[in-house]
Image (cartoon, rainbow, N blue to C red):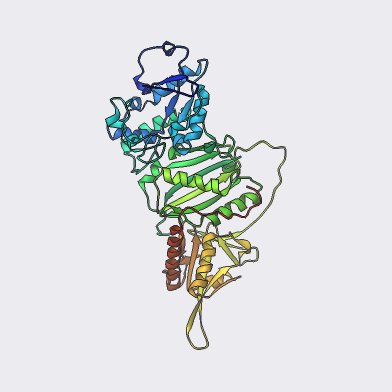
Amino acid sequence: MYSFRQRSDTKFTFAKHMAKHRLDIPLTAFGPASKHMLLVRHPLAVIRSFSKVLPATLEETCYPALLSLASELRTSRHGVPIILSEDLVRDAEGTLSLLCCALGMAPDPAMLDWEVGPKPEDGPWAPWWYAGSHASTGFGKGGGGPGASAVKGRTPLDPTLRPLLEECQALYAVLSRRALRPRSARPGGGLLSLDSGACPVHRGGTHEYAPDSRNDDTLVGMRDGVTGSFDLVWRPAATVSVLESGFLLGDGVWEGLRLLNGVVLFADRHLARLFEGAAGIGMSIGMTPEQLLRLVYATVDANAMQTGVHIRLMVTRGLKPTEDGISLFTCHASAAGADEALMLDPHGFVATCNSTNFFIIRSHIDIRGERQCQVWAPTPRYQMPGITRASVLGLCEQEGIPCRELDFTVTQVYGADEAFVTGTFGGLTPVVRVDGRRIGRGSPGPTTLRLQAAYAALCLSEAERGRVRTLHVACSEW
């Protein structure tokens, strides 16, 4: 407990208590001038921290006591402000300004920083719990202090603690919905979600991946376009309504991103494609590309992710409204395949795959009797504007590999020496069979392997540029 005076010469006395340590004293006993507030931390952080010192139980996490206090104080004359420790890290000034307003205090910049080391008012629990705070100088400034990332230096959660996390998550969800949220946590409808997981290993399909137990407990970044709130939600609890437009109608856009050495590769190109797609269906994302990229990095940083990460960024139109009438458009494509569908355009030429771009490599004997290879890519008229596709076309020029964009048939695919597909998730993936027919020798060919190596080098070069850059996204409306 400690006291301080503000410039108005008003004296304030502050006392911190664990909710579970509340004595059997009515809240009215503190007097009419007392005000209460609740600070709530994400259960994944609480359980990880607590279980390092003592066995974690539902009661020890304080969530039942916190919710009981919130319910009791909700009926009081002033109610009870609730703040989230994660918001203190993201925007300490905005969060404390809201809290001070609710408590009838003037915000003071001195609240944002402190000196390193123990404090006189720490109390007897400091040796067990305050090491991070003592090493810090502010909210989120070193030492893993107050409200530090829920998963800093994270390891997979002990499976025996998962049932406890599920119990706590339900109580935390109620408290977090009632919390005061700063504007930085509400960047401005629809639904935005950012999920991340292990990158693929190529054992067959272009989207196969190696199982990674860390994915079981990832935090999914979710932004509500109506309220504007942004939250990091435990993956099993990250859900949307069955009336959500993306679920009902596929009404939305998505983008796949890769993280290498802490950097989202080709972020400007990916976000340009995302915003262009949203504009194409008449949907406003409601934020700038820079703001969106900050949310992406907030999500991967909260999960302590650096490399070998695939991110699925999804934006939808939100809850489906009831309308008096609708308009319809039609389209068609022919498809055949196995791990991926190879799609034909309306004229019967090869166009693209259902989630990747397609290439073949054909060779011929020139007039000198030497074998020459040439990369063929379908014309862009009937396919996705692939980021990786564009990179590979540029690499062909850089590496001196002849490359053409042209119309060609499935029969010409059957006779190709090599084939591969490109995509953000799998990079450059060899194709060894089409419609059951073996392509070339039935294994990755030399040109494919050469381009794979060049693309890997390009990704490393992109990552070395770091996160700080200007995004040049051409779109008339965000």
Front residue of 317 and 391: 391
For the view shown, which residue lies furthest in the bottom direction? 368
Can you see residue 108? yes
Can you see residue 178? no
- In the picture, the quarter occupied by the N terminus is top left
Q: Quadrant of residue 192?
A: top right
Q: Is residue 411 left or right of residue 149?
A: right
Q: Residue at x 27, y 31 (%)?
A: 127
Q: Measured along the vertical axis of the image, is residue 74 above or below residue 138?
A: above
Q: Measured along the vertical axis of the image, is residue 39 above or below residue 31?
A: below
Locate residue 290, reporting x and y percent. 55, 48
Front residue of 162 and 37: 37
Q: Residue at x 51, y 40 (%)?
A: 222
Q: Measured along the vertical axis of the image, is residue 135 above or below residue 331?
A: above
Q: Residue at x 40, y 26 (%)?
A: 63
Locate residue 18, reporting x and y percent. 36, 23
Q: Quadrant of residue 261?
A: bottom left
Locate residue 410, reporting x and y percent. 56, 69
